[in-house]
Amino acid sequence: MTRLLSTAGLTVTFGGLHAVKAVDLAVGEGSLVGLIGPNGAGKTTLLDAIGGFVAASGHVRLDGQLVDALPAHRRANLGLGRTWQGIDLFDDLTVRENLEVAAQPRRLRRSGADIGATLSLLGIGHLAARMPDELGHGERKLVGVARALAAGPRLICMDEPAAGLDTAACAEFGRQLQALVATGLSILLVDHDMGLVLSVCDDIYVLEFGRVIAHGPPADVRVDERVIEAYLGVGAGVLR
């Protein structure tokens, strides 16, 4: 499988503290890769480093191109998308208009061309005319994902997109992620819902204290003793 994203020795240091330590990671074209770990493991910081939002050493490649020296907006122009833990939307714009703003710079990209189709793909087409303050927490999260898709990325780094979704909605969201990947999109998924990550991802990386402690398909990660130990007291039963 062609590597769309890869990192080599990616390291982030804050005041002498290594938040991310020499991480090697790869996401293939049209694949869904999970990134999990206990709170404080460095998952969001790793996404920030990949996206160019924090200073980092090591290397990041997008579709084979070295992007270490490129700022975040240049990486986005190369097809790297991002969703955030926060759910800030333009509150004076409708849901549809929020997506149109995101799609504006790259209207010719296929995924940004049809806002209605993007919303429908996530099961929120009925929200197109709503204002953000009329939405529930879970709905706002899904609009944030749709807004990232509207920009037409080739790969999206998703940070806790299922937070706030109930069990049924989370299961449906997992099916929607798999449908997105089936269209050729690549996803690097950070989420604390272990059931979701283990059920939908092709490949999983596990971080602890900024380092990768395990990597492999869900069936292998689920029984890895290092992973179970890292999650003791934090939903380790799900791994069993």
Image (cartoon, grey):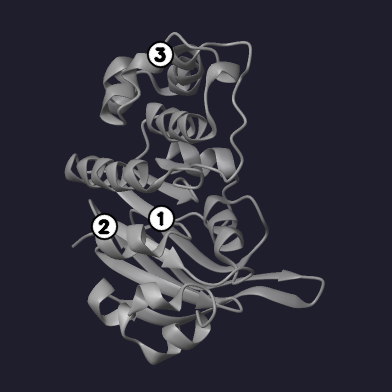
Task: Rate crowding at label 3 as few (under 14), some (14 to 19) or many (20 or more) other CA atoms within 10 Å.
Answer: some
Residue 115 coordinates in the image, percent (x, y):
34, 17
**Residue drawn at (54%, 13%), measured in percent from left and top?**
131
In-front residue for pair 129/23 = 129
Q: Residue 126: name its quadrant.
A: top left
- Name the residue type under label 3: Ala
Q: Given this view, does label 2 or label 1 mark the residue nearer the observer?
A: 2
Please state if 174 lies on the left or on the right of 66 as rendered.
left
Task: Rate crowding at label 2 as few (under 14), some (14 to 19) or many (20 or more) other CA atoms within 10 Å.
Answer: many
Residue 206 coordinates in the image, percent (x, y):
44, 75
Judging from the image, what secondary structure is the residue with disc 3 in? loop
Query: CB of mark 2 within 8 Å of CB of mark 1?
Result: yes
Pick the quarter of the image with the C terminus: bottom left
In-front residue for pair 216/51 = 216
Pick the quarter of the image with the N terminus: bottom left
Q: Is residue 3 visible?
A: no
Earlier sequence position, callout 2 versus callout 3: 3
Determine whether 128 is above or below 138 in the image: above
Earlier sequence position, callout 1 versus callout 3: 3
**Residue drawn at (75%, 76%), measured in percent from left and top?**
17
Determine whether 230 is above or below 31 in the image: below
Residue carrying label 1 = 189
**Disc 2 and disc 3: Cα gap in Å?**
27 Å
Residue carrying label 3 = 128
Residue 138 coordinates in the image, percent (x, y):
48, 35
**Disc 1 and disc 3: Cα gap in Å?**
25 Å
Q: Farthest residue toward the right?
A: 15
Task: Rate crowding at label 1 as few (under 14), some (14 to 19) or many (20 or more) other CA atoms within 10 Å.
Answer: many
Earlier sequence position, callout 2 versus callout 1: 1
Mark linked to residue 200? 2
- Name the residue type under label 2: Val
Determine whether 22 is above or below 72 in the image: below
